[in-house]
Image (tube, helix red, strand yellow):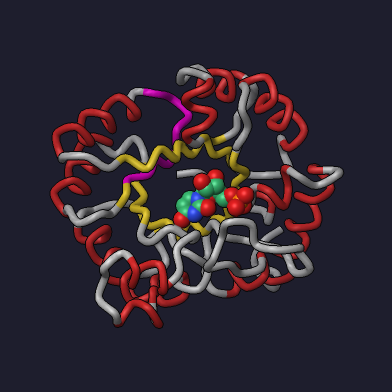
Amino acid sequence: MAEKKTAADCIVFPLDLPTVAEAAEYARQLSGRVGMFKIGLELFISGRGQIIETIRESGDSAIFLDLKLHDIPATVGRAMERIAAWDGVVFATVHCGESPAMLKAAVRGSSGRVGVLGVTVLTSVSGKDLQKAGFDPVYADDPGALVMKRAQMVRDAGCAGVVCSGHEAAAIKAEFGSDFVTMVPGIRPAGSVGKDDQKRVVTPGQAVQNGADYLVIGRPIRDADDPGKAAEQIAAEIREAAGGGLA
Ligand SMILES: O=c1ccn([C@@H]2O[C@H](COP(=O)(O)O)[C@@H](O)[C@H]2O)c(=O)[nH]1
């Protein structure tokens, strides 16, 4: 696992960009200002997987491969074996879905070389969305209850941690311990105009106070006039919220 020492180390920047060239330019600008780069579906597909090598060769940046695998156990296990063969990938995601066997297969496939994170309930999903999708009505007012159920599955399968919103991070740390990783997207700095497609959002300071280990922050940095400066301002907020716990 990546060692965390500074506020910038807590920031994960998603390279949500259409081309490898644009992603490489952001990686250059933000190198040293964020701790990890996240590669998601858009860039992985457009770059035909080659982006992993590009980022790895550009420096010592850790990579979070966020492909959110979701399939039968054999398929997910074999995909995770291929991911584990890549140097530089620190974390990779699997949707929790409804299959503990799939989560266990992912962990087996990782051979301990990649930290498997279970995506509990997407931060773009509200309690009302869950109700419309046919989940138990109890989750309409309390989506965090479903997050906790899924976090239990993830923990039982032996995963490194979860992707959850900042609203659930404190309960997850209390239930599953400080070593269980909380990767938290849905971050919007105070004063942000709108939440885009995110529904369960917190500020960087709230995320840290609630126990988030890593904060995934995309558009507030990517779309800023000066992305480097935006990342530095967010790191300053994280540092203050950590109350001396981070350099
Ligand atoms: O529940 C989830 C899981 C993953 N994501 C990813 O995080 C970033 C968030 O980007 P923003 O621009 O800061 O909204 C994006 O890559 C998502 O795919 C998530 O948002 N929620």
Quadrant location of residue 75?
A: top left
Quadrant location of residue 60?
A: top right
Quadrant location of residue 19?
A: top right
Residue 148, compared with residue 70, is above or below; it is below
What is the count of numbered marks?
0
**Is residue 44 highlighted in magenta?**
no
In the displayed structure, does residue 23 sit left or right of residue 66?
right
Considering depth in this image, is 32 or 134 the residue closer to the camera?
Answer: 134
Q: Residue 170's spot in the image, x, y percent?
A: 47, 75
Residue 244, compared with residue 186, is above or below; it is below
State whether residue 66 appears in this view.
Answer: yes
* Residue drawn at point x = 68 percent, y = 31 percent: 27
Considering depth in this image, is 119 or 3 the residue closer to the camera?
Answer: 119
Outermost residue, front side = 132
* Residue drawn at point x = 27 percent, y = 42 percent: 70
Q: Residue 243's spot in the image, x, y percent?
A: 69, 73
* Residue drawn at point x = 54 percent, y = 39 percent: 38
**Is residue 89 highlighted in magenta?**
yes
Q: Residue 223's spot in the image, x, y percent?
A: 76, 44
**Stretch of the chain drawn in magenta:** 86-94
Q: Residue 85's spot in the image, x, y percent?
A: 34, 23
Residue 61, compared with residue 176, is above or below; it is above
User: Which SS does the magenta portion mostly show?
Assistant: strand
In the displayed structure, does residue 10 sit left or right of residue 190?
left
Q: Quadrant of the C terminus?
A: bottom right
